[in-house]
Image (cartoon, rainbow, N blue to C red):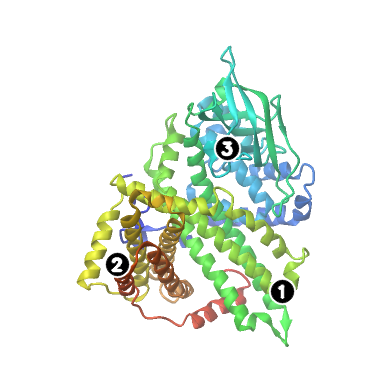
Amino acid sequence: MSNLPKGGSFLFSQTDPQDIFTPEDFSLEHKMLYRMVSGFVTDSVLSRMDELEAKQDGLIRELLEAAGELGLNGADIFEEYGGMIMDKISTTIIAECMGKSGSFAMTQGGQTGIGSMPIVMFGTHEQKKKYLPGIASGKKVGAYALTEPGAGSDALSAKTRADLSPDGKYYILNGTKQFITNSAMGDIFIVYAKIDGDKFTAFIVDGDSEGLSTGAEEKKMGIKGSSTRSVILEDVKVPAENLLFEIGRGHVVAFNILNLGRYKLAANSVGNAKFALELAATYANERKQFGTPIANFGLIKEKLAEMAIKIYVTESMVYRTGGLLENMMESLDTSGDDGGQVAAKGIEEYALECSMNKVFATEALAYAVDEGVQIHGGYGFSAEYTIERLYRDARIYRIFEGTNEINRTIIPVTLMRRASKGELPLQEAIAKLKEDITGGSIVREGEAGLVQAAKDIFLLTMAAGMKKYGKDLQKQQEIIGRLADLAMQAFAMESAWLRAQKAVANQGEANAKLKLTMTMAYLNSTIGRLEYIAKETLTALAEGEELANLLEDLKKLTQYNTRNTVALRQEIAAAISENGKFVV
């Protein structure tokens, strides 16, 4: 573990392109898995989407069991408990391919993520033996009951209460949970409650428990085929042995599970965005106006190209992070009774990257489906066209697994906390940057220079924030949100660049040309936006001569030669139109 990069360390060091995982590194088994899951989604889910959206009785269970037979529900569950444990790249592939399955992606994601991972990571041997085989097979449906009417992002303010019975055999749960995925058919609920009103604790609650009921189905904007209801707990008796992990440490369970959930949601977003681009490119090739396919029009080309660029960058981030998670898992001994907790601790190292993936990917998806509708014109607003459903379904992604606002606050705050513990060299990097600026040794050459510029812009702005507010910086959400965007874009730019460089080294420049083109287009069109964000933030942090000096320093960091991004996008659009889908 000591040889693995620390979470967030990308901001303070150079990464060798050969050290990151990219989709070009898929093994034969990975490629076979990709084809199998894609085929399952196309043949078994998309072909029945109308029935799924209408909540046809029994269909969700039928599809979950079919996924279980293929091993897709048990990829994170050890064979001892009915699963077929896979590496983190494989579980990422499953999540990506499931992404385009609409409502089913939410149902299956709830089953394999938040609905079961608390037991996988924090359950006892007896709990795992009792509950996990049913989840892996799909014969039992898992659900996660954390959110309450008055406690969404602020989960620890939950009001649901648990009291130990006089004989010590049961906990009596009372409270209401809201917006619970899979609730209508939930057999196993992970429920959070406060013992004696103050000790936030996780419990495994059987769906058929007396006193547990569900409200009416929510009338949702999208993901209509998945079940979302409130869960009402009225004197529900939960056996004492169903307490999950430790009394008063439910937050440890909740937050660790969310790290993996955020990462998988990012992978879902990649698959969904690719589907949106495929629909848009196919339509643009077929739809003619003024005697020519609209794919030949410049402004349509720009939309197709930008969709593809965002997908490429997101995919690069997601699989780079998947490689980090897999390397972490390989470095750990998870064979003991506490193996799940060891794994959770390992994944927590990259909590910052998980949050960045979640925010970037869900916003890239939002862009893709929005432009997909625009390319379809009036037909995109019609429910007869699939892109209309994708547009509605995608909106929840920026809210699930912690809103993007909450995830943005996590990024700089985590960096500051780890730096204060000596785990990341934040102050040292800031001092080195100031020295370089003063000494006039800032040199920007090519795209590698733009990547370093993005990191330096973040450091310069972060330093100004810390100087003004110190530890109280985390309370300044407008500043924190902008710092998060700067750090996230540095990770995005570097991930795209490293992937392209690795492809050039391994496959030759000719075979890596489209990756290079997408990378150059993204980096050159993003750096100016980062400069603007930094200017806006610095102006909120300083004034007078201090501000003038900071803006002068910023100017030194952003000296670079621009490329013709219009021409680069034309190349990308031509490749997308020719193939009718995302290609690199």
Q: Seen in the image, is 386 located left or right of residue 198?
A: right
Residue at the bottom extreme?
A: 291
Q: Is residue 321 visible?
A: yes
Instruction: Report the residue marked by disc 2.
Output: 546
Give SS at disc 3: loop
Residue 435 badge: none
On the image, the x and y values in percent for residue 81 come to: 55, 32
In the rendered structure, find residue 377 and report the number of the disc placed on it: 1
Name the foreground residue: 23 vs 164: 164
Is the residue 527 above or below the residue 45 in the image? below
User: Circle 3 is placed at which residue position?
Assistant: 116
Q: Residue at x 42, y 62 (%)?
A: 486
Neighbour tally class for label 1: few under 14, some 14-19, many 20 plus, Cα within 10 Å: few
In the rendered structure, are the residues bearing label 2 and label 1 in contact, judged by CB atoms less than 8 Å apart? no
Cα gap from disc 3 to disc 1, whole angstroms? 41 Å
| Separation of residues labelled 2 and 1 (CA atoms) | 50 Å
Amino acid under disc 2: Glu
Q: Hey, which residue is sitting farthest left in the picture? A: 439
Q: Is residue 423 above or below residue 548?
A: above
Q: Is residue 29 left or right of residue 334?
A: right
| Residue 363, image x, y percentages | 55, 61
Indicate the position of residue 14 as horizontal and vertical percent values: 31, 61
Amino acid at the residue labelled 1: Gly
Does any portion of residue 93 appear in the rendered image? no
Crowd tier of the residue under label 3, counting other residues whose Cα lies within 10 Å: few below 14, some 14–19, many 20 or above: many
Image-based side of 83 in relation to 214, left or right: left
Of helix, strand and loop, which one carries label 2? helix
At x 44%, y 35%, the residue is: 341
Specify the farthest residue to the top. 167
3 or 1: tag closer to the N-terminus: 3
* Mark 3 or 2, nearer chain start: 3
